[in-house]
Amino acid sequence: MRLTHQREEILSFLRSKRAHYNAVEIYDAVRERIPNISLGTVYRNLGKLVEDGEIITVETDNRSIYYDGYIAPHTHFVCKCCSQIFDFEEEGQSFKSISDKGFTIDKHRTVLYGTCTECNEKN
Amino acid sequence: MRLTHQREEILSFLRSKRAHYNAVEIYDAVRERIPNISLGTVYRNLGKLVEDGEIITVETDNRSIYYDGYIAPHTHFVCKCCSQIFDFEEEGQSFKSISDKGFTIDKHRTVLYGTCTECNEKN
DNA sequence: TATAGTAATAGGAATTATTACTGATAAGGA
DNA sequence: TCCTTATCAGTAATAATTCCTATTACTATA
């Protein structure tokens, strides 16, 4: 993977912030340093960075994907009121410590990604 | 919430199948029984059924939302190869029994939804 | 330093999923 | 049965993302 100026700026932006951004927000931020970068370039690079494991995605209720430069395993909390995404380190599905901090949990979703038994056997 | 013919068909379709469908798939299925139902009606009813806790959603990598009539807490597994969504009952993040069945897990994502501390304090 | 081959880019058009709008319809209570 | 109002069908609009094309940058080799 070629480390282009554009890719470098996208990655360093995400790494510099401990927060979660969608493609357009990243586009706006990176545009301050590379004014003529295109949205397509942002999408393509985000895709490659995810593929490469340099960043991770957060899929939420609302239809846009958020990107996260912090890649250690962690749990995301989406506030239905302010739409902010919070990080929590807790493992497992015991979320008592999160509620103790004042968060109200309505629901939780766990999704695994990978290859199923049948597809594994085929290949 | 009024129990309309359309809503009833959508709900009974999802409850009758132990699988996961996106809005267009549900639209196609329900159209066999209500030929002139519109896609907008399907989306609106799915939204209300989710709001009401009658069904749940699965947010995956690909950009469409899947709906599930099985609402007991469970974990979803998305195959990157055949795109099928599988259900697993395991709690916690110990997914050994899933791997033991021949599934390869690349990554897992846990997302909580609710209200954050700050928003709770405001209201 | 040219040159060719490959990979990446900008910009915009196209695609896909979802939501919003409008006049007509029907669910459910009085 | 009648009335109110949520819901409906149909269609237009929006938003997020991907695709396409001409152009540019990088790399290795001569």
Image: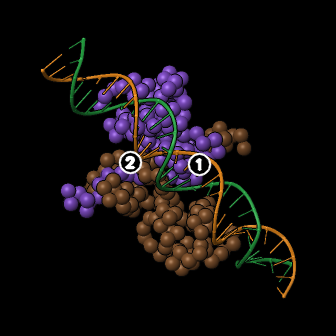
Chain colours: A purple, B brown, C green, D orange
Q: Is residue A26 left or right of residue B92?
A: right
Q: Do labels 2 and 1 share a chain?
A: yes
On screen, residue A74 versus residue A120, left or right, reads right
Amino acid type at circle 1 is: Gly
Give the camera-side residue of B62 and B1. B62
Q: Is residue C27 left or right of residue A28?
A: right
Of residue A46 and residue C8, the one placed in the foreground of this image is C8
Q: In which quarter of the image is the C terminus of chain A?
A: bottom left
Q: Where is residue B33 in the image (x, y as percent from the top left)?
A: 54, 80
Report x, y in % for residue C10: 47, 30
Is residue B65 visible in the rendered image? The answer is yes
First of labels 2, 1 by sequence position: 2
What's the residue at 37%, 52% (across, down)?
A112
The amino acid sitting under disc 2 is: His
Mark 2 in CB contact with mark 1 (< 8 angstroms): no
Q: Which mark is residue B108?
A: 2
Name the chain letter of the residue that bears numbered label 1.
Answer: B
- Give the chain of mark 2: B
- Residue B96 appearing in the image: no
For label 1, the residue is B114
Q: Residues within 10 Å of mark 2 (few under 14, many from 20)?
A: some
Q: Residue at 55%, 72% (x, y): give it.
A: B10
